[in-house]
Amino acid sequence: MSVITIERKVLEKNDEIARQNRALLAEHRILAFNLVSSPGAGKTSIVERTLEHLGKSLKVGVIEGDVQTDFDAQRVARYRVPVIQIVTNGGCHLEAQLVQDALLQMSLPGLDVLIIENVGNLVCPANYDLGEAFKVVVLSTTEGDDKPLKYPSMFRNASVLLVNKIDLIPYVNCNLSALKSNALQINPHLQVFETSCTTNAGISDWCGWLRKKGAHRS
Amino acid sequence: MHELSIAQGILDIIGQYVPEGRAEEVRAVRVRVGQMSGVVADSLEFCFSAIVNGTALNQARLDIEEIPLRSQCSSCGKEFAVDTMCFSCPFCGSLDVAVTSGTELQVVDIELADNPAGAS
């Protein structure tokens, strides 16, 4: 038997393209974040409320990732912001190359913030760097308070947790303080906001934090 | 469930190292998979065997070394295993801990049979 040493990261190609994306975004002074959650947690609604809140003061672009359809891009286009839809055709997560292709189609000069809405999935997107500044994970109250413990990678790798559908707390079996303590056990540095896209609760706090982050980027 | 694309990524990497014409001699592909790499070892093994089946690499088996999740406390400096996904220091209680291992996803090496391709 003979052995050939390799010692290389499996995702090194993705990581290299992510570095290129990060450099391109830095060159244009764009604050980009990767929005992740399970399907139906409310990512696109968060995008809509964020655009309503920040749209007048900041120029925001959106990249939408879905397995199929351009429904989300259509929803976002109503806000008259630059939007590119990526259809992964079965792929369970966005990869840096797909985001790079989208960045090349988008007019970047003048953009302040870029929202990359990932495919709905709490597992795979955790491990693919897209070139974002940070990850924002959305967890809705209808999903249950134990999810951070079940999907630790995603919560460990995120910087912000948006606990969404907070208005449904009276109707669902979700212990809000348990949810938060589970998430903070995985990642004590998580910035947590409680939001509702129906009542707009917490949206101005989240957008205020985002605006501050954007101001610090340059 | 992205083990199929990870398996493909492993194939792409080893393709750059297998000497020309010796793919049939590859017997083992050694990989390191961290506990928090997001990859399930059994699924990866299954996907790998599925994609090499019927190719010149079909005698290659995937050897997975699973790497446990470990952290180091930034306050007291002690190292510890993270068993229950609780990222607080068991020695001093600090929440300021850094993961030191368990996120790996690497191709380590490949093993080739010394006999010529096709011979047994």
Image: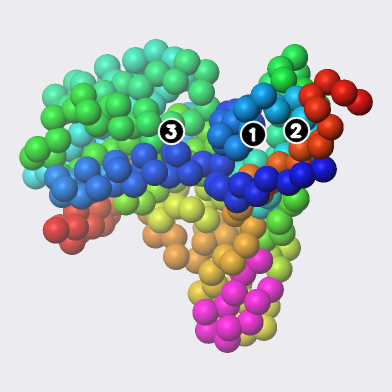
* Quarter of the image with the C terminus of chain A in it: bottom left
State the extent of the magenta-drawn residues as a range: B70-80
> Are discs 1 and 2 both within one chain?
yes
Q: Amino acid at mark 3?
A: Glu
Q: Position of residue B55 (x, y in %)?
A: 71, 17
Residue B72 within the segment the image draws in magenta: yes
Chain at tag 1: B
Does residue A154 lie above or below B117 as drawn? below
Which residue matches tag 1? B18
Q: What amino acid does circle 2 point to?
A: Val
| Chain bearing mark 2 | B
Colour pattern of the rendering: rainbow
What residue would you read off at disc 3?
A: A95
Reading the image, the residue beneath label 2 is B26
- At numbered mark 3, what does the secondary structure look like: helix, strand or loop? loop
Q: Quadrant of residue A49?
A: top left
The quarter of the image holding the N terminus of chain A is: top right
Tags 1 and 3 on a common chain: no
Chain identifier of the residue bearing label 3 in the image? A
The alpha-carbon separation of the residues under discs 2 and 3 comes to 29 Å
Cα–Cα gap, marks 1 and 3: 27 Å
User: Which amino acid is tagged 1?
Assistant: Val
Please tell me in which quadrant of the rendered image residue A217 appears: bottom left
Q: In the visual, does A205 lie left or right of B96?
A: left
| Residue A10 within the segment the image draws in magenta | no
* Distance CA(mark 1)–CA(mark 2): 8 Å
Q: Are marks 2 and 3 in contact (CB under 8 Å)?
A: no
Q: Do the numbered discs 1 and 2 sit on residues whose CB atoms are within 8 Å?
A: yes
Label 1 Cα crowd, 10 Å radius (few <14 / some 14-19 / many 20+): some
Secondary element at tag 2: strand
Q: Residue at x 60, y 54 (%)?
A: B103
